[in-house]
Amino acid sequence: MPPAARPLPICDGLKKGAAGSDHQKLLMEQNKRVNSFSYSGISTFKSCPRAFKYKYIEEIQEAFTTIEGHLGSSVHAAIEWAYKQRQENDDPGTTETLDQYKQVFWNSGGLEKTRIIKAGFTTDDYFQQGKTFISFFLNSLFHQDKSATLYLEHKFEINLADGIIYRGVIDRIAREESGFLRLIDYKTGRAVSPLENFQLPSYSLYVFENNIDNEVRLCIEDLREQRSMAVSFSRGEARQVRAGLLKDIGQIRETVEFKTNPSILCRWCGYNHICESAYQAVNKPGGEDRGGGGGCPMCGGQLMKRNGKYGPFMGCSRFPQCRFTRPVEV
């Protein structure tokens, strides 16, 4: 088992004798309110500290949800439904699953409150994307999958250190025929390999704390690019992830001024109506051209040539924070 983590100091780095300072009092009050962290929360802080403050400290409800979020939740619900049907010895077909996707999940309510940000796209465009994702899932993944499902949309909490909780939701946990545990995340947006961010590696902490396995498989099912990415991950590597999480959380807990990080992505933020600098960077000129791709018109980063399922394309160097793409010019 991993060694017990050192308790995280509430105000590490403050000068001696500053116990009565307004700075320390603010930190202590803030840390009383926020002692539970998630991958989403930490990622939000890294992307925009102000958005983190609005959501997790002040607990302000976002003014809207995005159509991308509605698409993701609807597709995930359909995938969960399909595996639940299998657990009842009834493997659903494509037509049946797509009908559930449309009638039960896509039209389940709240669609009228979603916002479409990208110009030139309609609600039906996103709905059709979901149908493509689910068809790929059924025909290329689900019907060939022989692993035993243990949990679906599994919520967990673990104690990282004294008073510090880390929580998350694992799309699916399965036991492979080989005996390995498999942690699976289904992606409807642009995806990276399992080790390029800390989501699945951090979720492995829960699995290692509750099982004797010394190695698990981390798997990203990229429904958009129609590819599977899986890697082995050890208990020893998970210890390093724990240390990284505590470092990130320590930075959050020591922050008093939650600065904004304005970019085109502010358009997708449900707090842009109350943030004074939400659109500050939208009209900035593109970034300098270092790779022959020009500057990103969305955030000012660099455009770099990348390869996808359908061939090369230009993508922003700040992915996944910025998801701008365009075709390669011939």
Image (cartoon, grey):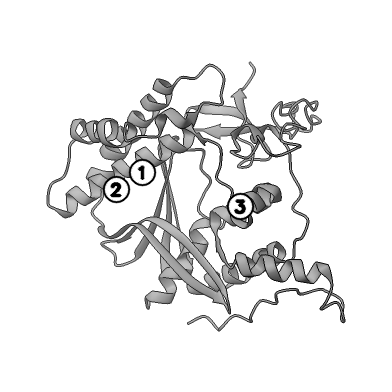
> In which quadrant of the rendered image does the C terminus lie?
top right
**Which amino acid type corresponds to the residue marked 1 in the rendered image?**
His
Q: Measuring 71% from the left and 71% from the top, which residue is drawn there?
A: 28
Disc 3 secondary structure class: helix
Q: Is residue 143 left or right of residue 67?
A: left
Circle nearer the N terminus (2, 3): 3
Look at mark 2 in the image and give the residue it sits on. 80
The relative height of residue 228 versus residue 159 in the rendered view (above or below) is: above
The relative height of residue 124 versus residue 114 in the rendered view (above or below) is: above
User: Which quadrant would residue 9 be assigned to in this image?
Assistant: bottom right
Circle nearer the N terminus (1, 3): 3
Disc 2 secondary structure class: helix
The relative height of residue 185 versus residue 30 in the rendered view (above or below) is: above
109 or 203, which is in the foreground? 109
Distance from disc 1 to disc 3, alpha carbons, whole Å, reads: 21 Å
**Which amino acid type corresponds to the residue marked 3 in the rendered image?**
Ser
Q: Measuring 55% from the left and 45% from the top, which residue is drawn there?
A: 61
Q: Measuring 48% from the left and 65% from the top, which residue is drawn there?
A: 233
On the image, the x and y values in percent for residue 281 come to: 76, 32
User: Which quadrant would residue 270 be assigned to in this image?
Assistant: top right
Q: Residues within 10 Å of mark 2 (few under 14, many from 20)?
A: some
Look at mark 1 in the image and give the residue it sits on. 76
Q: Measuring 83% from the left and 74% from the top, which residue is drawn there?
A: 14
- Figure disc tally: 3
171 or 1, which is in the foreground? 171
Q: Are marks 1 and 2 in contact (CB under 8 Å)?
A: yes
20 or 197, which is in the foreground? 20
Q: Is residue 315 left or right of residue 132?
A: right
Q: Residues within 10 Å of mark 1 (few under 14, many from 20)?
A: many
On the image, the x and y values in percent for residue 13 come to: 81, 73
On the image, the x and y values in percent for residue 285 come to: 80, 26
Look at mark 3 in the image and give the residue it sits on. 43
